Each structure stands twice: as C-alpha cells, then as structure tokens.
Amino acid sequence: MVNINLLPKNLRRRHEPGYWRLIAVLFPLLALAIIIFVQFSANQTEARLIEDRNLRELQLTRLQPDIREQQELQQRQTQLNELIAIDRSVREGQIIWSAELFTMLETLPPQDGSQPQIAFSQLNMQTLDESVRQQRLADNNYEGLPILAEMDVQGNALNAEALADYIRALQDSPLFGVSFQSATREEQTGLYQFSLTVGALTGGGNEP
C-alpha cells in the first residue's frame, strides 16, 4: 500500500531526528549539573577558608602569651636603650649631676628664720644633644651662652626679693644660665610660685 500525503507542505507533520530530543533533555541536565558543581566547589572553598581562619585564630590565641612576653621584652629593651643613650650622653658631655646640683644649691639664699627663702617642689634634669644645643644658641635662650644640660626647676619663694636674689645668683655664676618662665603670688600664703630653667654651661661664659 502506498500512502500519499496530499496536505500542503506547511501543514505536513515533520519528522525530526531523534538526537535533537536527546539534546533537549540532556542540555538542561548538563546545565543543572554544572550549577550544582560550581555551588559545591564554592561551598567547599568557603568551608576551607572558614576552617583556615578558625585554625589561625586558634593559633593566635595560643600565641598570645608569647606575643605579650615579646612586647614586654621589646618595651624593656627600648627603655634600656634609652637609659644607655642617656648614660652615654652624660658620659660624653661630662655632666656630673651631683656636682651640678650641689653647685646650684650653693646659690640658694640663706634661710630666713625657720622658713627657707627658696624651696624646690620639682626638679627635672636632662642632657641636651647637639641639635638642641645649637637651637638654644640660635634662640638666645641663655644670652648666647652654650649649654650642655638643662634643669627645669619649680618651687616657692618667700618673697619677690628672695626670688630675684636667687635668679641673680644663678646669672652671676659662671656655671649656669637662666631662662625665667613664670612667677605668681599666692594670696593665702603670700609665697611666690616660680618656674625657671637652669642651663648648665659647657664653658664659663660669665668668667672674666
């Protein structure tokens, strides 16, 4: 028997190859598989990163005592280096603080009765490096006299005359220069609170 299709070509049923149907089924499955693989890989990578981070945090926690000890040692080393630098600077500058202090105390006015005319409340001493010395000279802090060290002095004076005599004695000394900072009178006690900086000279600038 012979079958003849008398329908127009546009109405005739098309017979497509079977592999197109196979592709139509496999392509979505392949895309889904790729998506699942990519998501699985991303999850695995994230899990590894989280595990690595947790491991590092655990290691850091275990190392905290060692880190603190190292920081303390470094801080002590820094302090030791500062002390060594100060000692070297003092030795190089040949500043003997005991002698400097004793000489400065000799310039104090004599005691007036039971109350001293000048009383120190604070005394800070420091040796100056070369750059600071040159800056002091440039600023004419001590009337152009070269200094090696400074002593910041704060205290009380019995009256204005005692403070003036003490400053004058320091100025007249060949070993010191003076940079006056401030002086205020307390209403209740009548004492003068003063602040000044005493420079230890490298040479006798006031000597004849």
Image: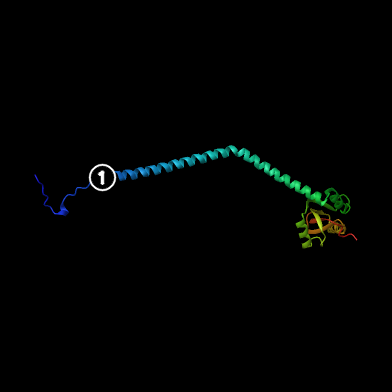
Judge the density around disc 1: few (<14), some (14-19), many (≥20) Cα neighbours within 10 Å.
few
Q: How many marks?
A: 1
Which quadrant is home to the N terminus? top left
Location of residue 69 (image quadrant) = top right
Position above or below: 63 against 110: above
Q: Report the front residue among 117 and 46.
A: 46
Residue 97 % position (x, y): 83, 49
Position above or below: 33 against 170: above
Position above or below: 131 against 85: below
Q: Report the front residue among 193 and 145.
A: 145
Q: Residue lying farthest top?
A: 62
- Taking the spot 34% from the left edge, 44% from the top edge, the residue there is 32
Residue 59 % position (x, y): 56, 38
Disc 1 marks which residue?
19
- Taking the spot 65% from the left edge, 42% from the top edge, the residue there is 71
Residue 179 % position (x, y): 80, 59
Q: Report the front residue among 130 and 4.
A: 4
Q: Is residue 199 left or right of residue 58?
A: right
Q: Report the front residue among 92 and 185.
A: 92
- Taking the spot 84% from the left edge, 53% from the top edge, the residue there is 118
Residue 103 % position (x, y): 87, 52
Which quadrant is home to the C terminus? bottom right
